[in-house]
Amino acid sequence: MYRFLLILLCFVMAPTMAIELIAEPKISAQFSQAKASGTFAMLDVKAQRWIGHNADRAATRFSPASTFKIPNSLIGLATGAVSSVDDVFYHHDGQPKYLKSWEHDMGLRGALPISNVAAYQELARRIGLPAMQQQLDQLNYGNHQIAGGVDQFWLNGSLTISAIEQVQFLTRLAQGALPYPAEMQAAVREIALLEVGKNWKLYGKTGWTGRKQPSIGWFVGWVEQDGKLYSFALNMDIPDASDLPKRIEIAKASLRTQGLLPVVK
């Protein structure tokens, strides 16, 4: 296997951290089979072992798109913009939305699973620019940039983050190690839960920068299996909306190559 040395800045835990991402041929094969261009980074937290595909891209920052809904949820709770994940803060204005599922009142518990952009824009406006900037600086999230409006920066390309940085952030959330009360982190983990099996749980969030080229898709999250934690992030080019399902398909297939998640029969 080939080894790539990534020198990345990690301002939260240490001034500089060297990350060795080991190229895993079985994971690279998933991208080849799907005819997709992208990256996958996974951290075995206990072993502190990084594996994946396309190390250079794993260190490259892109707009987080809707994956930002995870930190946005935390920030909303931490700043008091919402009182809980069940606080109904979004009220449908009666106008048609991108998805019919967005056309009703809801709180974070309802808004995160369906990726309600309008709801999270309302949440960001409640938080406000000064508090949002302070929170992103505290989290050391990506490049910290929020130009272009408090309800646009994670969509317009101002805020960017790499797959490696996504994994680092999600690892801390999964461990309850972010600078927020434990119950807030637990509440966000709860609404980010996607699937549950006999000895495993899958948490995560997708993202898509839209049809404007280059269009980037994300699937980020973590797996808890047999008492161990594995955090991951995938991003890939999305030349056409029909390619969106590949985000989850490739990520899950990559996880399965490492003995995570059940094998599809």
Image (tube, grey):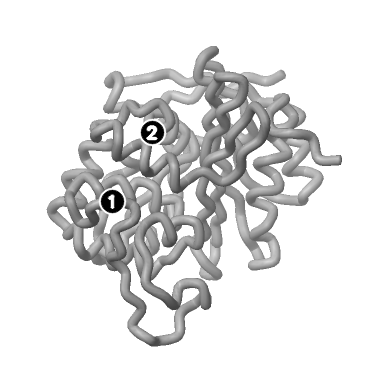
Q: Residue at x 33, y 83 (%)?
A: 93
What amino acid type is highlighted by mark number 1?
Ser
Image quadrant of residue 233? top right
Q: Quadrant of the C terminus?
A: top right
Residue 158: give x, y in percent of width and height: 33, 57
Q: Is residue 46 above or below residue 209?
A: above
Q: Secondary structure at mark 1?
A: loop
- Identify which residue, 101 or 148, lies in the foreground: 101
Residue 84: give x, y in percent of width and height: 28, 51
Q: Quadrant of the N terminus?
A: top right
Q: Residue at x 46, y 72 (%)?
A: 102
Q: Residue at x 24, y 56 (%)?
A: 82
If you read the primary sequence from the N terminus, does the residue marked by circle 1 or circle 2 appear first? Answer: 1
Select label 1 or label 2 by which is in front: 1
- Identify which residue, 220 or 32, lies in the foreground: 220
Q: Tell me the residue that label 2 is attached to.
A: 173
Q: Can you tell which mark lies on residue 84?
A: 1
Mark 1 touching mark 2, by CB under 8 A?
no
User: Is residue 211 found left or right of 89 in the rendered image?
Assistant: right
Q: Is residue 223 above or below residue 49?
A: below
Q: Residue at x 26, y 55 (%)?
A: 146
Farthest residue, direction right:
265
Q: Secondary structure at mark 2?
A: helix
Q: Is residue 121 above or below residue 135?
A: below
What amino acid type is highlighted by mark number 2?
Leu
